[in-house]
Every structure is written in structure tokens, then in C-alpha cells.
Image (tube, rainbow, N blue to C red):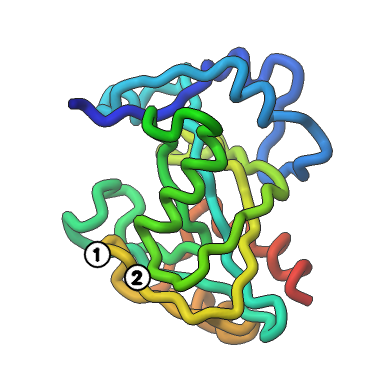
Amino acid sequence: MPREALVVKREILFKNKHFEGFLEKRAFDYISLILNNCSYSERSDELEHDRTLKQIIPYIIIINKKEKKIFAYKRANNDNYSEKRLRNKWSIGVGGHIERIDNKNPIQEGMMRELKEELKMDNYPIPKIIGYVNDDSGNVESVHFGIIALAKTSEDIKQGDDEMEHSSFYTIDEFESLISKQENELEGWSKIIWPVVKSFLQ
């Protein structure tokens, strides 16, 4: 059975509101718009280059509010990570495509499924949606639309699969020192979201 992804036509998604970068959830109700106008498309190379559709991606930021730390990871640099364009890049967002199996409440169920697939935790926090991200400047980003959610935990986290080469919690200073190094490239959405998360942690 072919893998599918939840999509919305770009013209419908941005008919009444278009933005670039990060947008707070309260600024526009994209959740209802997506749920009322979504469909599923087979995941293929063609879909990954189809700018008429936006693939909806839950993007979950995990923080330890008490210790003021953020969970970050480096994507694998081999076939363990399927999206070649994002390999070897650092990220602060855990997530992926919403699939047809996430049928009752696709956005929420998709978020929880991705958390459980990618991470091992004793107690999985319920992510709280804080906004959206859109970036039409990059090849990967231009065909995706991010639903940004914040998940708080005080637990240690272990990787659930081989898509991550390395992962850990970092303080603000540790993380900014990490991504300031030339060899550590932060992916596009994480660059956009980091200032928002940083202000929240502070």
C-alpha cells in the first residue's frame, strides 16, 4: 500500500491569508481551514516538487521549561533519513507527514504518532499548537506547511529510530554555540522558529 500525505491546495490555504515565516495561532485559524479542505496524495518525487499543494507537517518543539533547555538533534547523513535535502542538518522540530491512519483527528494524532515513532519517553507530553510556519524560499520548505507545537517535559529522551545521528537537550547558550559553528547547519524551519522558542524559554 503506497504511503500518503495529507495535503491542501495552495490556492485554498492562502486564499484569505498569506504569510512568510512564523505566524501565531491566534492570528488566523489555519487548523479549521486545513481540516475542512484536506485530502491525501501519494508520497512521491512528483509530490515533493508540486508547488500547487502544501503538505501539512506537525513540527513539535520539545523543551524543559524548568531547566530552560531545548531538545535538538542532527539528522542522519545516510539512507536512514529519506529526505536527502535535509540530511546532516540540525533541527529543533520533531515531526513528519500526516497519514491516512491519523483519521479521527489527523493533526493531533499525527503529532502523537510522530513523537512515538521518533522518540522514546516514559510519558509523552501533549503538544500545544502555538502557530504556523511557511517558507516558500527553499525547495523543501516551499511544498510544506508547518503546524508548530510546543511540548514540555522534564524527562530524558532517547531516539526511537535511526533517523537521528545525535540528539540531546541544550541550554540556550549551548545551542547557539553549537549552530554558530560552520559545520553545523540548522534547517530552514528551525532557523525561523528558534527566536520564538528562545524568547519563550527566557
SS for callout 2: strand
Left or right of 197, for residue 95: left
- Distance, label 1 to label 2, CA atoms, is 8 Å
* Disc ID at residue 159: 2
Instruction: Report the quarter where the C terminus lies.
Output: bottom right
Query: Residue 50: x and y, percent?
Result: 39, 22
Percent position of residue 144, x then y: 48, 35
Occupied quadrant, residue 139: top left
Q: Tell me if residue 143 can be seen.
A: no
Q: Position of residue 182 (x, y in %)?
A: 43, 75
Residue contact between numbered discs 1 and 2, judged by CB atoms under 8 Å? yes
Residue 190 percent across, percent down from the top left: 55, 58
> Label 2: how many residues lie within 10 Å, few (<14), some (14-19) or many (20+)?
some
| Residue pictured at 42% horizontal, 45% vertical | 96
Mark 1: which secondary structure?
loop
**Between 185 and 106, which is closer to the camera in this rendering?**
106
In the picture of the structure, the residue carrying the numbered disc 1 is: 162
The correct choice, above or below, for 111 with respect to 163 in the image is above
